[in-house]
Image: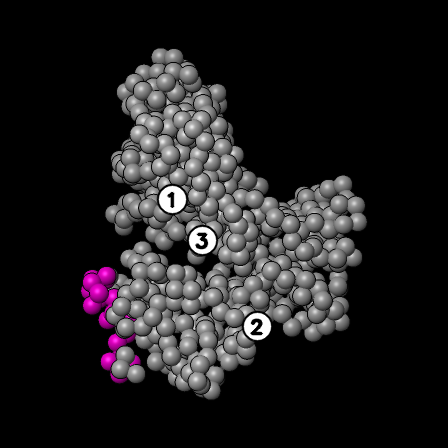
């Protein structure tokens, strides 16, 4: 009680802990008022602090326990009646997680325990005395999923068991669509299809899924979630409901439900856990019926922070240095889904100022960045990368982001813009960084123009991160250790037996995969005079460019990956599966 008698608010705690300056506090208060969000959310969005830092400050400043993975306070009894003490809607909207009850006192994890109104309302709805502890909003929402939905693992199956065609659709209204769309879907299979699609989406979001694959094979339905880059099978809808589910997805995406012969692309948005998630939908006709792929884009989950992307120190320094140059072309290469867009936007977020004009042309716009003019490609009306880029050059830009270089016209316009005083960032689909030079020349760009305009080449891949709770230490074989040191450019340790690598094992936390999340490995090559000469005089000879990079002591993808293996971030098997030695 002494804690709350002091009436400390979150702003005071953070300022007293010297984590926020008065200026930062005012800026966060202004954003919170304008966008009607919590002060803590504003602090995180502005990049001043991370959720974990705020939680730790509240714990220390208020003298409350910190509920996190280490303390194991979040490992609640899923069979208890805690979910009956606090309604799910209240728990989600106020970020209040009941943990356990003892002698009439309910211990509740709160993202902001300084909010007296929430505490008083908790006492009313639970009928218990409240003992607050501190946790991050993310941890609270994840555990709420487990408590109220039993982890979401059987959500689709339970929906199929509990719902019926004539049911009243008791599921939460997950997707925000117009009423006439819901009326239209009832012509297929009514609320059952609505509930089933909602359940699939909920479970996918709970499991950190990036893509949902739904298709038929003969008379069987396949449902797979792509989690951390790998597809995993899930309980599929019944075959007789497949067409209804596809129609529901089409209606949400504003597609033609009668068209089954041609591919269609669309999108919609949904809200869950106070997050807005964009869903990009692709429907493609196949041998046994249509296949649906839904890509989930959780903008709030994308950390636009260059520090968290996995760059080695020298790579980050080279990238940031190139991005602070007044002109030049920065090219980032890699396959689809390798995090190129996130990296480029993190860099823009790092250098963005009100004193410069930032513009982008993308297909589609995946991340919206405040203070930047963003244009989406619309090929049907002639708005292409090349045409938009020509228009940009008449808009007095300082920094231009081009989503992808696909043709000669776009390549030449980017190169000339970089040569005439603009900083241009773009992506290219090649297997490694130096191959981008050959690709530009193959498109028809002149070698001297490429050499004069290029400022930096980079390539990126994503590797899965070993689960910190179940990873298993082992001593690598001598030949594996020798290979790792050779390819990473390191010396063999004096006592190889003391070297420890880690491999996946699997536990409940990581759904028995052994991995949680992904991190980038990169190669970053500034264009020096030697590389410029090779491009100009020898047409970008690939072998000589790679030799020049090695001579300069730069890390390639494989070398950067081995460093993460030595640190225990990822496994040898994961690294070898996503990189090749060149």
Q: Which residue is labeled 1 in the image?
A: 309
Give how far apart the Cα atoms at labels 2 and 1 are.
Answer: 38 Å
Q: Which segment is the magenta one?
A: 4-22
Question: What secondary structure is found at the residue carrying circle 3?
Answer: loop
Q: Position of residue 205 (x, y in %)?
A: 54, 58
Q: Which residue is labeled 2 in the image?
A: 79
Taking the spot 28% from the left edge, 20% from the top edge, the residue there is 529
Kindly indicate whether the residue at mark 1 contacts the one at mark 2 (C-beta within 8 angstroms). no
Give how far apart the Cα atoms at labels 3 and 1 are.
Answer: 22 Å
Q: Is residue 310 above or below residue 560?
A: below
Q: Position of residue 113 (x, y in %)?
A: 35, 74
Task: Tell me if residue 520 is in the magenta stretch.
Answer: no
The residue closer to the viewer here, 311 or 190, is 311
Q: Is residue 236 above or below residue 29?
A: above
Q: Position of residue 131 (x, y in %)?
A: 38, 79
Q: Which mark is residue 91?
A: none
Taking the spot 30% from the left edge, 83% from the top edge, the residue there is 1
Task: Tell me if residue 9 is in the magenta stretch.
Answer: yes
Badge 3: few (under 14), some or many (20 or more) residues near its Cα, within 10 Å? Answer: some
Question: What secondary structure is found at the residue carrying circle 2?
Answer: loop
Q: Which mark is residue 469?
A: 3
Badge 2: few (under 14), some or many (20 or more) residues near its Cα, within 10 Å? Answer: few
Taking the spot 44% from the left edge, 40% from the top edge, the residue there is 474
Taking the spot 51% from the left edge, 77% from the top edge, the residue there is 82
- Where, quadrant-wise, is the C terminus in this rendering? top left
């Amino acid at each position: 009680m002494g804690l709350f008698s002091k009436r400390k608010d979150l702003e005071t705690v953070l300022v007293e802990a010297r984590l926020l300056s008065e200026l930062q506090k005012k800026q966060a208060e202004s954003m919170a008022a304008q966008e009607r969000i919590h002060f803590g959310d504003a602090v995180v969005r502005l990049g001043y602090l991370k959720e974990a830092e705020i939680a730790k400050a509240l714990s220390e400043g208020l003298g409350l326990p910190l509920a996190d993975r280490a303390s194991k306070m979040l490992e609640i009894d899923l069979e208890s009646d805690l979910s009956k003490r606090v309604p799910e809607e209240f728990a989600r909207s106020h970020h209040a997680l009941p943990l356990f009850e003892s002698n009439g006192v309910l211990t509740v994890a709160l993202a902001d325990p300084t909010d007296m109104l929430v505490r008083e309302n908790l006492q009313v709805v639970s009928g218990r005395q409240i003992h607050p502890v501190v946790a991050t909003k993310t941890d609270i929402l994840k555990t709420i999923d487990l408590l109220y939905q039993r982890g979401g693992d059987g959500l689709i199956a339970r929906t199929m068991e509990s719902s019926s065609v004539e049911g009243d659709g008791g599921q939460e209204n997950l997707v925000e669509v117009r009423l006439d769309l819901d009326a239209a879907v009832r012509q297929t299979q009514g609320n059952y299809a609505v509930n089933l699609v909602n359940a699939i989406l909920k479970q996918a979001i709970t499991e950190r899924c990036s893509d949902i694959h739904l298709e038929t094979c003969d008379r069987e339905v396949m449902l797979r979630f792509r989690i951390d880059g790998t597809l995993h099978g899930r309980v599929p809808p019944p075959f007789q409901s497949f067409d209804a589910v596809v129609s529901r997805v089409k209606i949400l995406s504003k597609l033609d439900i009668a068209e089954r012969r041609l591919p269609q692309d669309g999108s919609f948005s949904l809200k869950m856990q106070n997050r807005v998630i964009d869903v990009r939908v692709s429907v493609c006709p196949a041998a046994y019926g249509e296949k649906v792929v839904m890509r989930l884009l959780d903008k709030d989950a994308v950390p636009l922070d260059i520090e968290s992307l996995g760059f080695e120190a020298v790579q980050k320094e080279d990238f940031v240095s190139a991005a602070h140059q007044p002109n030049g072309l920065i090219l980032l290469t890699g396959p689809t889904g390798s995090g190129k867009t996130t990296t480029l936007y993190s860099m823009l977020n790092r250098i963005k100022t009100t004193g410069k004009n930032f513009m982008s042309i993308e297909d589609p716009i995946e991340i919206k960045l405040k203070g930047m003019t963003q244009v989406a490609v619309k090929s049907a009306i002639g708005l292409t990368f090349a045409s938009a880029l020509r228009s940009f050059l008449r808009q007095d830009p300082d920094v231009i982001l081009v989503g992808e270089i696909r043709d000669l016209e776009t390549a030449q316009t980017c190169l000339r813009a970089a040569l005439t005083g603009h900083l241009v960032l773009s992506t290219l689909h090649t297997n490694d960084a130096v191959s981008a030079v050959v690709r530009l020349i193959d498109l028809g760009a002149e070698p001297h123009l490429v050499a004069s305009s290029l400022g930096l080449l980079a390539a990126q891949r994503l590797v899965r991160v070993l689960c910190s709770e179940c990873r298993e230490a082992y001593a690598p074989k001598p030949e594996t250790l020798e290979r790792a040191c050779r390819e990473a450019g390191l010396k063999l340790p004096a006592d190889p037996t003391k070297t420890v690598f880690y491999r996946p094992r699997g536990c409940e936390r990581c759904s028995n995969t052994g991995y949680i999340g992904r991190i980038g490995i990169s190669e970053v090559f500034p264009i020096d005079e030697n590389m410029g000469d090779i491009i100009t005089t020898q047409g970008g000879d690939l072998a000589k460019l790679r030799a020049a990079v090695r001579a300069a002591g730069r890390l390639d993808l494989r070398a950067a990956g081995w460093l993460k293996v030595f640190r225990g971030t990822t496994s040898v098997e994961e690294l070898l599966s996503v990189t090749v030695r060149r």
